[in-house]
Amino acid sequence: MNDKEIRERIERGRNFIRSFNDEAEDYYTDQQLKKPQPPLTKAAMSDQIIALPHDLADLTIENDFLKIINGRCSHRVYTMEKMSLTELSYLLWCSQGVKEIRGKSYATLRTVPCGGARHEFECYMAIQNVEGLADGLYHYLPMKHEIEMLGTRDDLKDFISASLCGQSWAAKANIVFYYSAVFYRAEWRYGIHAHVPMLMDAGHITENVYLAAESIHRGGCAIAAVDGRIADAAFGPDGEEESIFYAMPVGTIRKEDQKAEQDFYAFVKEQGL
Ligand SMILES: Cc1cc2nc3c(=O)[nH]c(=O)nc-3n(C[C@H](O)[C@H](O)[C@H](O)COP(=O)(O)O)c2cc1C
């Protein structure tokens, strides 16, 4: 790529962030035009549906809020011990759980905020070593707090690494959450202004995963470097109306691995940054 092309792509990115500055006269969104609202969530795609535990009594949850906030950090070294189905249930509830429906079926109100309560995301998972679940690919069904199994893969670890642009450390996580945007769910309400808030909304989800994981002594790391084409092909989004663009592995961790964690940033010291 030459300097001019680089400059143009950077400018395009900056303009995307500034998209609310654009004049948009005589513009009406589909909601304003009274077009039908798209479904609030994606329907199940398989008949292999698994209910998630609602009773969290089995979990030891840290409830000192400041301790959780101060303790939160990214973890990239996982010990590959088993996690429980209740832990998975807790992480999903804290990050995407549906608490209430606004109106008859206008919006879902969840454990995270979202512009216009559009909740335009779907959550897919690559799961290994979670009690009671076969290793494989799953999809969260937030309306009933269930998951569905989408399939198995012999190359699950390779898939995780390739779909996260070669970040092979993530293949030791028990759960890798993959988030897609179902674009029209937000575009119906916000049209040409839907896309910047989508990124803001996605950040709330992973922050809740960070905090929930910290509160049960598990660790994770938000990941922007996602190869959406590989992830879409595995989980089903068509890459047109729905695309996977964000991920977060979560796994079991231990204090002794702090040095290994710091090694990810050894270059800071080496390069005197
Ligand atoms: C939006 C976002 C994208 C990120 N993408 C990656 C990534 O692709 N790979 C990675 O190793 N860490 C990624 N991180 C983790 C950051 O590097 C990490 O949050 C940062 O170094 C600060 O460390 P802390 O989370 O421990 O405070 C991402 C974090 C966020 C919020």
Image: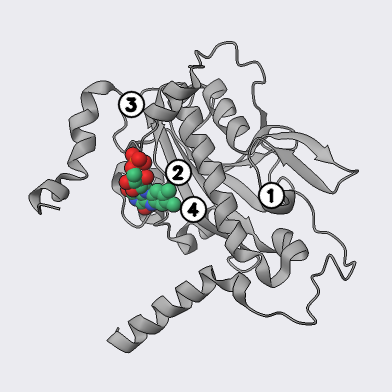
Q: Which mark is residue 119?
A: 1
In this orientation, which residue lies closer to the viewer: 56 or 9? Answer: 9
Q: Position of residue 215 (x, y in %)?
A: 47, 23
The kind of residue on which mark 2 rests is Met
Quarter of the image for residue 77 reads top left
Q: Quadrant of residue 128?
A: top left
**Could you give the CA–CA distance between mark 3 and mark 1, rounded to whole angstroms?**
30 Å
Q: Which residue is mark 4?
A: 246
Callout 2 crowding tier (Cα within 10 Å): few <14, some 14–19, many ≥20: many
Disc 4, SS: strand
SS under mark 2: strand
Amino acid type, label 4: Tyr
Q: Amino acid at mark 3?
A: Ile
Q: Position of residue 237 (x, y in %)?
A: 60, 59
Q: Measure the C-alpha gap from mark 4 to mark 1.
A: 15 Å
Q: What residue type is disc 1 on?
A: His
Q: Quadrant of the N terminus?
A: bottom left
Q: Are marks 2 and 3 in contact (CB under 8 Å)?
A: no
**Disc with the residue nearer the chain's start (3 vs 1):** 1
Q: Which residue is mark 3?
A: 253
Q: Residues within 10 Å of mark 3 (few under 14, many from 20)?
A: many
Q: Does the Cβ of the disc 4 residue fall within 8 Å of ligand 1? A: yes
Q: Are marks 4 and 2 in contact (CB under 8 Å)?
A: yes
Residue shown at 55% from the left, 23% from the top: 85
Q: Position of residue 110 (x, y in %)?
A: 69, 38
Q: Nearer the viewer, residue 67 or 220?
A: 67
Q: Earlier in the sequence, mark 2 or mark 3?
A: 2
